Amino acid sequence: MKRVAIGITVLSSGILTILSIFVCASLYLPHLTSWSTAYPSRLFFLIFAGQSKFSNGADGLGLGLFFVLGIILTIVGLAILAIEYFKKEK
């Protein structure tokens, strides 16, 4: 039962991290004037690109590390819950 609680906590913290980064980037998206075409969309440019002193207005939020950490936490939480769900009781 303790591992299930740990899995739920890790899963919910990962999902909360991902969703808060999406909300943060969505709120800043209308203020973006230019972006690099190396990213698939403007939203991912905002999340992954950092501040650049050489660009003229094309600055992202630089939250890529936290976004990847949120994805890792979500996967680990799902793995813990899956292991506990399929584990045979003695």
Image: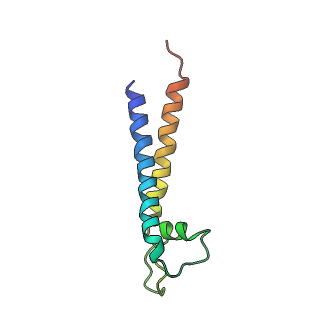
Q: Position of residue 6 (x, y in %)?
A: 39, 34
The structure residue drawn at horizontal position 46% and vertical position 65%, both measured from the top left corner, is 26
The structure residue drawn at horizontal position 47% and vertical position 63%, both measured from the top left corner, is 64
**Which colour style is shown?**
rainbow
- Give the mark count: 0
Q: Position of residue 9 (x, y in %)?
A: 39, 38
Residue situated in front as seen by the camera: 47 or 42: 42
Furthest-top residue in this view = 90
Q: Position of residue 70 (x, y in %)?
A: 45, 51
Image quadrant containing the N terminus: top left
- Quarter of the image for residue 24 reads bottom left
Q: Is residue 11 above or below residue 31?
A: above
- Quarter of the image for residue 52 reads bottom left
Q: Position of residue 51 (x, y in %)?
A: 43, 77
The structure residue drawn at horizontal position 45% and vertical position 47%, both measured from the top left corner, is 15
Q: Is residue 62 above or below residue 13?
A: below
The structure residue drawn at horizontal position 49% and vertical position 56%, both measured from the top left corner, is 68
Residue situated in front as seen by the camera: 50 or 26: 26
